[in-house]
C-alpha cells in the first residue's frame, strides 16, 4: 500500500477525479481493460482500489446506468481514496497504459450551439444571405451522427474520400482536400429516458453524467456538396474523436457560469429557471503550435436546452448516448474552433512554424486540450483529444 502524491498545480488533483478505461500496454483489450481515474501523474485502477466489480469492465456503461446517487457515492469514495494508502497493484504510470474509448457509445448527436461559429459558417457557406438561418435562435440545430465511428483520442484518422464539386459544376470523387477539425464538448448520458417521454431542462442532472472533449473531423468539400437539403452525412461520419477521460458534472460545479442572453426568449420547453453554461477554456494545437483558444462559456444554447430539445419529440435516450455541442468558437479570430474559420474558407492561411496551412495535410496532428476552474484557485483538466491524419492509400 502506498500514498499517491499529487503536485499542487496538477490539473488532475483531488477535485477532478475523471473516469477512463485503460489497459496496461501490450494487454488484450477484451480481457485486460479496467475502469480507472487519474490522480496527479498516476492512473488508478478502480476495480482494484475500490474492489468494485462494476469497474472490472471495458467501458463505463454499467457504472453510468446506476444513476446519480451511485455516481455521488463513488465520487465520495474516490475523494477518500486521495487521503489514504492505495494498493500498489492499482497504481500505474500514464506511459505504461493505453486509454480506450471510455464509453460504449449508444446514439450520437451533434449540435451547432455556438452563435459565433454559426455566424462565421453562414458567412462562408452563404455569403449573400443572412448568416443565421431563421430557425437558429429558436432551437438548438443538430443532426444524428454515426456512433459506430466515434474513436478514442490517439486513433489515426484516415483521410476520407467522397464527391467534391469541381469548377465545371459536376462532381468528381477522391480524397478530401478540405479536411478540418471541430473543437467541441461532448455530454455523456448515464441514465436514459423512455420512448414517448421528454427530458425537461430541470431534469438534466438526473440523466447526464459528465463531459468529454470531442473533435468532430469534417471534410468541408464533401460537406458543401452533399449537405442540402438534409444536413451533414459522409463529410462527418468517417470519424469523430473522443477524449479518454469523462469528467463528471460534479467536478465542474465551480465552472458554472450564466448563459449569455437569448433573444428572442425560447419556447417554454427550452426555458430554464437558471440558464447555465460552463467556463471551459479549450486550446487547439496544430502540429504542436497553439492556434486557438475556443471559450465554451460563450455558447448560446445550454447543455440542458440541447438535451430538452433532442428529446422534445419523445425520442428515447440510452446509457452511453453522446451529444456534442458543435464547434466552439468565440468572437475573436484566435477563438475559432475550426480551421475553415481560422483560415476564413482557405483564403487566409494559418502560419505554423515556418509553414502555412489552410486545411489538414497528411501527417498533421491536432491536439485539443481544455481546463476549467475548480474550487479555490485550482483548475480541472479535461485531458486531450488527439488525432493524426493518415493518407487514404495507407488504409487497411
Ligand atoms: Mn460538429
Image (cartoon, helix red, strand yellow):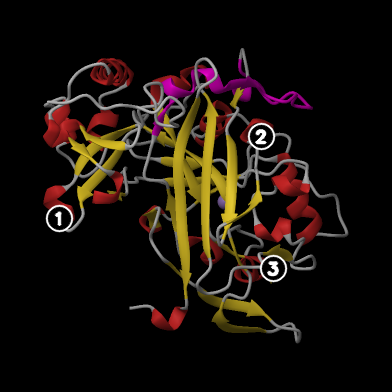
Specify whether 219 is left or right of 138. Answer: left
Badge 2 element: loop
Q: CA distance from mark 1 to mark 3?
A: 39 Å
The residue carrying pointer 3 sits among few (fewer than 14), some (14 to 19) or many (20 or more) residues within 10 Å by Cα, namely many
Mark 2 closeness class: few <14, some 14–19, many ≥20 residues within 10 Å? many
Query: Which of 13 and 127 lies nearest the eye of the viewer?
Result: 13
Q: Quadrant of the N terminus?
A: top left
Residue 39 visible? The answer is yes
Q: Quadrant for residue 377, please give it.
A: top right
Find out if the beta carbon at label 3 lies less than 8 Å from the nearest ligand 1 atom.
no
Do tag 3 and tag 2 residues touch (Cβ < 8 Å)? no
Residue 299, numbered circle: 2
For the residues labelled 1 and 2, the Cα–Cα distance comes to: 41 Å
Residue denoted by label 1: 27
Query: Picture quarter containing residue 339?
Result: bottom right
Q: Is residue 98 visible?
A: no
Please provide the residue range marked out in magenta: 247-272
Amino acid at each position: 500500500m502506498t500514498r499517491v502524491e499529487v503536485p499542487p498545480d496538477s490539473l488532475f488533483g483531488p477535485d477532478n477525479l475523471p473516469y477512463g478505461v485503460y489497459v496496461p500496454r501490450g494487454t488484450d483489450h477484451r480481457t485486460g481493460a479496467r475502469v480507472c481515474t487519474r490522480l496527479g501523474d498516476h492512473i488508478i485502477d478502480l476495480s482494484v482500489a475500490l474492489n468494485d466489480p462494476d469497474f472490472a469492465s471495458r467501458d463505463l456503461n454499467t457504472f453510468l446506468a446506476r444513476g446519480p446517487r451511485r455516481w455521488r457515492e463513488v465520487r465520495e469514495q474516490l475523494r477518500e481514496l486521495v487521503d489514504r494508502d492505495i494498493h500498489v497493484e492499482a497504481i500505474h504510470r500514464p506511459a505504461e497504459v493505453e486509454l480506450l474509448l471510455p464509453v460504449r457509445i449508444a446514439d450520437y448527436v451533434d449540435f451547432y450551439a455556438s452563435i459565433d461559429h454559426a455566424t462565421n459558417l453562414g458567412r462562408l457557406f452563404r455569403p449573400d444571405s443572412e448568416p443565421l438561418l431563421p430557425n437558429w435562435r429558436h432551437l438548438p440545430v443538430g443532426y444524428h451522427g454515426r456512433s459506430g465511428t466515434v474513436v478514442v483520442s490517439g486513433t489515426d484518422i484516415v483521410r476520407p474520400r467522397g464527391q467534391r464539386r469541381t469548377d465545371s459544376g459536376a462532381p468528381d470523387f477522391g480524397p478530401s482536400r478540405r479536411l478540418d477539425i471541430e473543437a467541441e464538448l461532448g455530454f455523456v448520458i448515464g441514465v436514459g429516458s423512455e420512448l414517448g417521454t421528454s427530458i425537461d431542462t430541470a431534469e438534466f442532472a438526473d440523466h447526464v453524467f459528465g463531459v468529454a472533449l470531442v473533435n468532430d473531423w469534417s471534410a468541408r468539400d464533401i460537406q458543401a456538396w452533399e449537405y442540402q437539403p438534409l444536413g451533414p452525412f459522409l463529410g462527418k461520419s468517417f470519424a469523430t474523436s473522443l477524449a479518454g477521460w469523462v469528467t463528471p458534472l460534479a467536478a465542474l460545479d465551480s465552472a458554472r457560469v450564466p448563459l449569455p442572453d437569448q433573444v428572442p426568449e425560447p419556447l417554454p420547453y427550452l426555458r430554464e429557471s437558471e440558464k447555465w453554461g460552463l467556463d471551459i477554456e479549450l486550446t487547439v494545437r496544430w502540429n504542436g503550435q497553439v492556434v486557438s483558444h475556443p471559450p465554451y462559456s460563450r455558447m448560446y444554447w445550454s447543455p440542458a436546452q440541447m438535451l430538452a430539445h433532442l428529446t422534445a419529440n419523445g425520442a428515447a435516450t440510452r446509457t452511453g448516448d453522446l451529444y456534442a455541442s458543435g464547434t466552439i468558437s468565440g468572437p475573436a479570430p484566435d477563438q475559432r474552433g475550426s480551421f475553415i474559420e481560422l483560415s476564413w474558407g482557405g483564403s487566409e492561411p494559418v502560419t505554423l512554424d515556418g509553414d502555412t496551412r489552410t486545411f489538414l495535410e497528411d501527417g498533421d496532428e491536432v491536439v485539443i486540450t481544455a481546463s476549467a476552474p475548480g474550487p479555490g484557485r485550482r483548475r480541472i483538466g479535461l485531458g486531450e483529444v488527439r488525432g493524426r491524419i493518415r493518407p487514404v492509400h495507407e488504409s487497411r
